[in-house]
Amino acid sequence: LSAQEARERIAAVEQFMVAYRSAIDEIETKLRVLQREFTHTDSYSPIESVSTRLKSMESLLRKARKRDCRHLDDVRARVTDIAGIRVICSFTHDVYRVRDLLLAQDDVTLLEQKDYVAHPKPNGYRSLHLIVEVPIFLSTGPQPVPVEVQLRTIAMDFWASLEHKIYYKYDGDVPAHLLAELTTAAHTASRLDADMERLHHEISALRTANSADDDHVLPE
Ligand code: 0O2
C-alpha cells in the first residue's frame, strides 16, 4: 500500500464513521427531548440517563475481521453496533415504554430486537436490545444508518457493568464460583426490579386517589 493509498483509506474510514457519529446524535437528541418533556410534565422521567459510544477502531476491526468483511460496504451490512446508545430507565415497564416512544417516531425503523428482559441470557444478563435505522442527511443526500440501542433498568445496568468488569479481568475465563455468584446476583437484581415496580404502582395509585379527593374539595 503506498502512502497516498493509505491516506485515502484512512480518509474513507473517517468519512464512514461520520455517519455513525451523526446517527448517535440523532437518536440521542430524540431521547433527550423525551427526557426533558417528562421532567417538565410528569412527576418522574422513565429515562434516568442516556450514554453513547462509537465503537473503537480496534474493536471494529476485530469484529469486521471475524465477520469476513473485505470492503466498507461489508462492514456497513454486517456490523450493526458501530453506533451505540444505552438508555437507563427507572422501572422495567419504562424500558418498553421508551422503546415504544422511540419506534413511534416516523424516521426510526426497527431492524432487530433482542429481548433479554423477557428472556434473560443463561448468565442472568437482562436488557432490551434494538437495532434501529435512522436517516442522516449528508450533502450527498439521506443515508440510513443503524444504531444499537440498549435499554435497561438501574439494577440491570449495575449487574451488567460489574459482570463486564469481571469478564474482562479474567479475560473471559471467569472462575465457576464467581459465575454462580453473578447468576445469583442477577436473580436478586431481577427481584429488586419487580419489588420497585410494585411499590411504584402502589404509590402512583395512592397519588391518584389523593388527587381525586383534592379535586372533590376544590371549588369549581
Ligand atoms: P460492547 O463494547 O459493549 O459493544 P453482536 O453484537 O451482534 O456481535 P451478539 O452477542 O449477538 O453479538 O449481540 P447482543 O446479544 O445484542 O449483545 C451485544 C452487546 O450487549 C454486547 O456488546 C454487550 O454490550 C451487551 N451484552 C450482551 N451480553 C452481555 C452479557 O452477558 N454481559 C454484559 N455485561 N453485557 C452483555 P459487545 O460487542 O460485547 O461489547
Image (cartoon, rainbow, N blue to C red):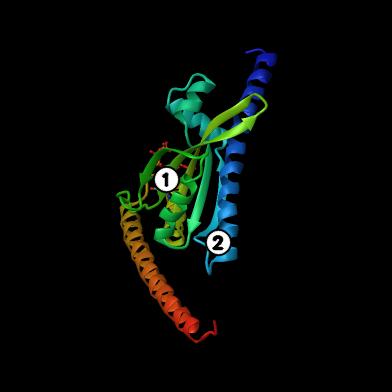
Depth check, mark 1 against mark 2: the one in front is 2
* Mark 2 crowd level (few <14, some 14–19, many ≥20, 10 Å Cα): some
Q: Residue at x 40, y 51 (%)?
A: 127
Is 103 rendered above or below residue 162?
above
Q: Which residue is mark 1?
A: 129
Query: Which quarter of the picture shows residue 180?
Result: bottom left
Q: Quadrant of ligand 1?
A: top left
* Image quadrant in which the C terminus is located: bottom right
Q: Position of residue 48 (x, y in %)?
A: 53, 60
Residue 197 can be seen in this image = yes
Under mark 1, the amino acid is His
Q: Residue at x 52, y 63 (%)?
A: 45
Q: Position of residue 134 (x, y in %)?
A: 53, 37
Under mark 2, the amino acid is Phe
What secondary structure is found at the residue carrying circle 1? strand
In this rendering, would 33 be left or right of 4? left
Q: CA distance from mark 1 to mark 2?
A: 23 Å
Q: Position of residue 191 (x, y in %)?
A: 33, 66
* Mark 1 crowd level (few <14, some 14–19, many ≥20, 10 Å Cα): many
Q: Is mark 1 within 8 Å of ligand 1?
A: yes
Foreground residue, 195 or 57?
195
Query: Which quarter of the picture shows residue 212?
Result: bottom left
Query: Which disc is residue 206 wearing?
Result: none
Q: Which residue is mark 2?
A: 38
